[in-house]
Structure formats: structure tokens, C-alpha cells
């Protein structure tokens, strides 16, 4: 495999490498000389001493390198959308470049907090590794790519929206906000609310996109998922992977920069749990996939709690347990309805492996356990009367739905359980929010 600068894309990546190298050298000189203290402001600063012009030059170089980065990024998304390596590499490189600039600015404004200083260093190393790989891979291209102008941009935006699993994201944001309000025992500030939910949205949407990238072949065998953008071929695998990686990386920078380190770390843990632990391994490996994998969806309220308090108390872990216990009966109800789909796809869901009768019984058992867990908050005096009454009423309604699944059976009853359990989770966290502020 011979490296050349034969293609325009390879030449642009080589120019980008040179621009980032010069930017890095000048940035290091700014750090050593202390020039930043003599030219405050971003993205433009006014020097108060001659050495301050070095910082101004650095900012100008950031702007020029950004233009080159955008040109490389635009060409990749127009001409390399089918390339399994180039498009994801270009996307990750672009996000790391933006992240480096973003964290560099935040570090100075926030008076050099340790976790952001470390993040700035890690991002710089990652950027150079990613950029070196991008330059090498682009240099192996035999010819320039061809832009496809036959896109229906409205359909493509819709497909990316679908790739994000918006309904699941919305439910996760409700639980995140519940943790945020409950942790602070008051309505949080607009700024904290916005950045926590925005970061959470990016993390959830990115994880969902990566999940569909991993499951794209499996999804083709299931009626429920066969029309998803990647399974149906409306988006390429490279586009799905790139989109997911971009959102997940952005989510961490948002959380770390505007919320706090613990919230960012928990959000990142949720991404790894869902993408690698569940999607890559558990889903196809064991009938307990949903039980163990439920931990991924249980992390958002902990993120909200950490955003409000900077720590995790017993109440935060109970919120985790609520969603952990809610997940099996919710998804097993769906698995009953889609039993044949999962069987064709080879996914070892409980009704496929151990039968519908045992699944119905397990739905009832887990529902009872879920109701008990929801009552732990008032038992430990961590929630008040509004939450207690709501938890009892909602729990009885959910128990009735689970009892009907157990006694009556059938897809219609199971589907009702699936739909109602989604509303149950949203309502119980709404009750927690109202209880916390009233």
C-alpha cells in the first residue's frame, strides 16, 4: 500500500496536518511565555504587551486551521460517504479539533481546573493520532471520490432524526431532569438545565446511532426494524458510525465543560455500557441481556443528580434501581409481541428461549419488585407525600397491566403493558419532580 498525494482529499489532509502542527508549536510557545495573560479574550483578544501578540497570532492560526478542517470535513461527507474508514476518521478528527479549541478556551476562563487540563492534554494526543491515521489512509486513495447530488436532504435529515431514536431520548431526558430537580430539591437554573439536557440528548442520540450501526445486519431480519435508515440502506454504515461517534464525543465535551466532571464521567459510562457491554456483547450472548443491560438506561437520572450536587447519594442509587427494575418487564412485553422477529434475528430474548408463559410470569415478578423499589424513597424519608401517593397509584395501575399479561396473555395485552410502562416511568419521575419542588 503506497502513500501518495495523488488525490485532492489527500492533499487537503496533508495541508491540515501542517496547519495543526504550526498551531501546536505556536500554542506551546504561548503557554511557555505566558502570552495568554497579556491578551485576554476569545475568539479575539487585545494585547496589553508585545508578548500578547503571540496569543493573537495563535488565535488567528486557530481560525485558519478551522477553515482547512471544515474543507476536509465537507469533502469527506460529500465524496467519501461510503468509505468505512475515511468518513469516521475525518469526523472524529474534526470533533477532536473543535474539542481541543473549546477546552483550551474553557480552561483559561475556569482558572485551570484539573479535569479540564487533563482533558485538554488527552484531546491533543488523540487529535494527533487521529490526524496521522487520516493523512495515511487518505494517501492510499487511488482517485478522488465523486459527490452524489441525488440526495433528498429532507429525507436525510429525517433519517438522522430516526437514527437518534427520539422517543427513547425524550424518555431518558425526563429521567435525567427528574434526577436534576430531585438532587437540587429546587428548580435548577436555566443554564444548568440546558447544558445537562443538551449533553444528555447528545449522549443518548449518539449511543442510539451506534447501536443501530452495530445492529444494522440484524435489523434487516426484523419487521420492526427493517426500515431503519442503516438497515434499509438510506444511510451508509460509515455515515451511521460517524454520526454516532460525533454526538458521543460532543456530549462529553459539553458535560465536562458546562456541567461537571462526575456528570460527564457518568454520561460516558452510560455510552460504553449501552454500546459495548449491551449492544456488542450482551444482546446476542444471553437470555439475561435485558436484565443486565438495563443498567445503561438507568444511568441518566444519576447524571442529573450529579449535575445538581456533584456527588451521588442513596437517593440517586434508588433512582438507578427504579429504572433497572423497570427495564425487564417493559422490554419483555415488547419481546412477546415481536417474538418471531427476535427468533428470526437470532436474539436470545426470554420468550424466544424460555417461552411466553415464563416471560409473562417474570413480567409480573419484576413489576412487583419495581413497585417495592419505588417505595424505598419515602421509606428512607427521601421523598414526600406527593411522590408516595403517585408511586402507589401508578404502581397499582402497572401491576394491573402486568397481572393481565400474566393471566390473559396475548399480544394485545402485552402491547398495552409495553405502552403503559413507558408512560408509567415518565409519570413517576414527573411526580418526583413535583414532590421535590413542592
Image (tube, grey):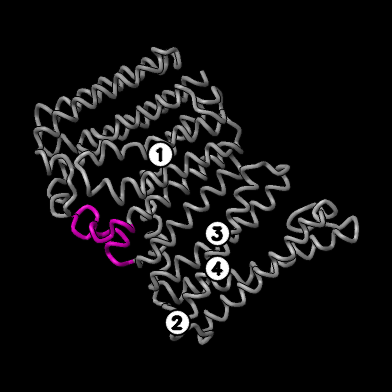
Circle 4 packing at 10 Å, graded few (<14), some (14-19), many (20+), is many
Q: Marks 2 and 1: which is nearer the front?
A: 2
In the figure, residue 282 lies in which quadrant?
Answer: top left
Task: State the residue position of label 4.
Answer: 131
User: Which residue, given by chain and number where applicable, does mark 3 sit on?
Assistant: 126
Measured as percent of width and height from the top left, residue 52 is found at 85, 58
Of the residues tagged 3 and 1, which is closer to the observer?
3
Q: Residue at x 51, y 71 (%)?
A: 134
**Label whose residue precedes the other's in the sequence (2 or 1):** 2
- The image position of residue 204, as x and y in percent, is 42, 46
Tell me the tag on residue 141.
Answer: 2
Q: Identify the residue shown where x is 30% and y is 19%.
A: 372
Q: Earlier in the sequence, mark 3 or mark 1?
A: 3
Point out the stretch of residues depicted in magenta. 213-234
Whether the residues at callouts 2 and 4 have beta carbons within 8 Å, the answer is: no
Residue 172's disc is: 1
Task: Name the residue: 53% across, 42% down.
Answer: 264
Task: Please identify the quarter of the rendering in which residue 410 is found.
Answer: top left
Is residue 419 at least partly visible in the picture? no
Q: Quadrant of the N terminus?
A: bottom left
In what element is the residue under mark 1?
helix
Q: What is the spatial separation of the Cα atoms under label 3 and label 4, in whole angstroms?
A: 8 Å
Residue 50 position in % (x across, y down) = 90, 61
- Kindly report the distance in space between the C-alpha atoms of the residues bearing marks 2 and 4: 16 Å
Please report the residue visible at 85 percent of the width from the left and 53 percent of the height from the top: 38
Q: For numbered disc 3, what is the local secondary structure?
A: helix
Mark 3–mark 1 Cα distance, whole angstroms, equals 30 Å
Amino acid at each position: 500500500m503506497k502513500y501518495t498525494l495523488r488525490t485532492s482529499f489527500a492533499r487537503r489532509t496533508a495541508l491540515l496536518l501542517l496547519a495543526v502542527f504550526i498551531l501546536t508549536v505556536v500554542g506551546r510557545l504561548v503557554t511557555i511565555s505566558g502570552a495568554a495573560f497579556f491578551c485576554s479574550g476569545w475568539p479575539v483578544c487585545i494585547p496589553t504587551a508585545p508578548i500578547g501578540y503571540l496569543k493573537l497570532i495563535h488565535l488567528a492560526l486557530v481560525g485558519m486551521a478551522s477553515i482547512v478542517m471544515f474543507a476536509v470535513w465537507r469533502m469527506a461527507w460529500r465524496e467519501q460517504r461510503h468509505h468505512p474508514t475515511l468518513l469516521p476518521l475525518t469526523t472524529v478528527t474534526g470533533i477532536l479539533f473543535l474539542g481541543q479549541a473549546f477546552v483550551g478556551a474553557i480552561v483559561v476562563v475556569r482558572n485551570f481546573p484539573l479535569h479540564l487540563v487533563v482533558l485538554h492534554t488527552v484531546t491533543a494526543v488523540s487529535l494527533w493520532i487521529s490526524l496521522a491515521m487520516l493523512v495515511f489512509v487518505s494517501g492510499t486513495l487511488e482517485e478522488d471520490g465523486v459527490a452524489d447530488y441525488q440526495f433528498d436532504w429532507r429525507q436525510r435529515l429525517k433519517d438522522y432524526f430516526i437514527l437518534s431514536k427520539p422517543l427513547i431520548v425524550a424518555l431518558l431526558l425526563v429521567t435525567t431532569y427528574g434526577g436534576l430537580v430531585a438532587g437540587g430539591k429546587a428548580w435548577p437554573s436555566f443554564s444548568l438545565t440546558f447544558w445537562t439536557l443538551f449533553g444528555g440528548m447528545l449522549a443518548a442520540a449518539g449511543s442510539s446511532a451506534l447501536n443501530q450501526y452495530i445492529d444494522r445486519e440484524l435489523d434487516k431480519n426484523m419487521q420492526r426494524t427493517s426500515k431503519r435508515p442503516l438497515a434499509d440502506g438510506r444511510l451508509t454504515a460509515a455515515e451511521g458510525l460517524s454520526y454516532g461517534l460525533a454526538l458521543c464525543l460532543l456530549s462529553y465535551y459539553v458535560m465536562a465543560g458546562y456541567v461537571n466532571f462526575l456528570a460527564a464521567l457518568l454520561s460516558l459510562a452510560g455510552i460504553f455500557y449501552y454500546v459495548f457491554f449491551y449492544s456488542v456483547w450482551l444482546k446476542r450472548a444471553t437470555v439475561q441481556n435485558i436484565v443486565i443491560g438495563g443498567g445503561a438506561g438507568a444511568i441518566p437520572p444519576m447524571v442529573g443528580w450529579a449535575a445538581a450536587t456533584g456527588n451521588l447519594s442513596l437517593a440517586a442509587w434508588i433512582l438507578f434501581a427504579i429504572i433497572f427494575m423497570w427495564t425487564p418487564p417493559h422490554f419483555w412485553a415488547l419481546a412477546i409481541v415481536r417474538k418471531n422477529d427476535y427468533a428470526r434475528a437470532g436474539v436470545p430474548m426470554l420468550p424466544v428461549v424460555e417461552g411466553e408463559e415464563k416471560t409473562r410470569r417474570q413480567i409480573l415478578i419484576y413489576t412487583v419488585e419495581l413497585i417495592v423499589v419505588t417505595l424505598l424513597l419515602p421509606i428512607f424519608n427521601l421523598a414526600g407525600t406527593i411522590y408516595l401517593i403517585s408511586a402507589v397509584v401508578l404502581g397499582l395501575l402497572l401491576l394491573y397491566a402486568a397481572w393481565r399479561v400474566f393471566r390473559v396473555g396475548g399480544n394485545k395485552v402485552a402491547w398495552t403493558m409495553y405502552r403503559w410502562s413507558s408512560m408509567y416511568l415518565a409519570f413517576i419521575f414527573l411526580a418526583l419532580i413535583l414532590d421535590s419542588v413542592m
